[in-house]
Image: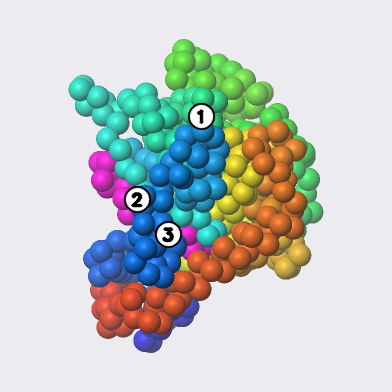
Amino acid sequence: MELDLSLSNLSQAFPEDLSPDQRARAQTIFLKKLSIKAHEFYGGKMQTVPKAGVYGFNWFNVWYTPGVSKVSTTIRDDNDQSFALSNRGNLVAVVSDSTRVLGDGDCTPPGGLGVMEGKAFLMKYLGGVDCIALCVDSRGKDGKHDPDKIIEFVKMLQPSVGAVNLEDISQPNCYKVLDELRESCEIPVWHDDAQGTASVTLAGLINALSLAGKKISEAKMVFLGAGASNTTIIRLIRTDGGKGENMVMFDTKGSLHRNRKDIENDPRLYRKWEICQSTNPNCVATEAEAIRGADVLIALSTPGPDTVKREWIRSMAPKSIVFCCANPVPEIWPYAAKEEGAYIVATGRGDFPNQVNNSICFPGILKGALAVRARKITDTMAIRCAHSLADFAKEKGIDPDHIVRTMEDTEMFAREAADVAMQAIADGVARVEDTWQNIYDKAMADIKASRAMTKDLMNLGYIKEPPKALLQQMLVEAVAEVR
């Protein structure tokens, strides 16, 4: 079957004689092959374009000298004017040391640029927010990554941007970087791997539990992986009503519980030690024991597809909920989890049902924070974002294969922005106040303008189409690799 350029027929494009496992692996191989070729074709994903017009020669003197001198002195006298008189009010920096890039680990400082540019691309297209990708070298003279270097870099950077999105920083450094910057900076510092993933996971969980007829306060939950994502997920779920006594979390050394001296004695792991003290009161030791009878499994651990065993899923409670969100390959293929009785299965990928991915969260929550010039993003703002996502999906209609909406829903991001902005005002972290409707209308206009501009550039040929033959070639190669 020939692929169309939109890739909307990707799931049907592979030969029928492939097994479910071969088909799933072929999709992953195809997307990776096409990604490298497409990035080479375009030379990356982002460019810089003016947002102001040039209507005659003297407009250069307005945008630059001598006219712009008045802008500089105005901001000098009131730094908050920088949000209105420059692009700072709609500009986010994505900052990473590239030490934990997706499931690929330390990719060297420039190795994270593909992901950071991708984040910037989604920020602009989905949320109408301008974004710059900044991969920094945090290594000291001893070759080790120093979290203090990232902290200092962001503090130096903050006068130029309205918010900072931390990305792909390995633990335990990620905990120190986020916690210190959240308190010391005058702009929101958001760790998308942690807070973003946690917000959208909570949104998906709210609707999954609703469909399964279960309550968050009663559900037995198991968490595989104790990195920045899952440790924040468990915190938000507990804040929103989940009970620690019903939860067990696992890291690479086993379950987290009050007897884990290795965690207690390492001050860098204070976040994990909090979980040790507040969950797993019976000190359940093994994954098989913890998952038996569980209502929910949330895995953000080692890419699979055999990290989560079929027999574990089979042992879960009726109408079980399985989030297997490792990238780029989930801990168990969705079809396998379904075969073993899972009622709802979600992954982090858009080529399977129920993509629980922070891409439907961060453009909206950062847009909302910028709209009221927030000084930080609180946990209650993140939880409000989760409920905004869940409520929007419920209004549109949910079922076991559609627990959250997708990146195609323009209105969703504007709703998130307005809801988060209202929470920022309520939490006392907003510099300015506005109405829900005004923020929604402005966000919607910016998002539509951003998408229209991209489409205009495509239609006018400034963004060229990749050769269709390239898609077909990558498809053929992917199928050949799995046969």
Residue behind mark 3: 121
Q: Nearer the viewer, residue 339 or 198?
A: 198
What segment carries the magenta color? 107-126
- Indicate left or right for 147 with 279 as reference: left
Q: What residue lies at 41% left-to-right and 56% top-to-bottom?
A: 62
Residue 248 locus on image (x, y percent): 61, 33
- Indicate left or right for 417 with 306 as reference: right
Q: Quadrant of the N terminus?
A: bottom left
Residue 348 locus on image (x, y percent): 50, 55
Q: Nearer the viewer, mark 2 or mark 3?
A: 2
Q: What residue lies at 30% left-to-right and 28% top-to-bottom?
A: 145
Q: Residue furthest bottom?
A: 1
Residue 209 visible in the picture: no
Residue behind mark 2: 65
Q: How many marks?
A: 3
Label 2: how many Cα within 10 Å (few below 14, some 14–19, many 20+): few
Residue 305 locus on image (x, y percent): 43, 54
Q: What residue lies at 44% left-to-right and 62% top-to-bottom?
A: 51
Q: Quadrant of the C terminus?
A: bottom left
Please state which amino acid type lies under the numbered disc 1: Cys
Q: Earlier in the sequence, mark 2 or mark 3?
A: 2
Q: Nearer the viewer, residue 128 or 15?
A: 128
Residue behind mark 1: 185
Q: CA distance from mark 3 to mark 1?
A: 25 Å
Residue 62 visible in the picture: yes
Q: CA distance from mark 2 to mark 3?
A: 31 Å
Q: What residue lies at 49% left-to-right and 63% top-to-bottom?
A: 125
What kind of element bears circle 2?
loop
> Magenta stretch: dominant SS?
helix
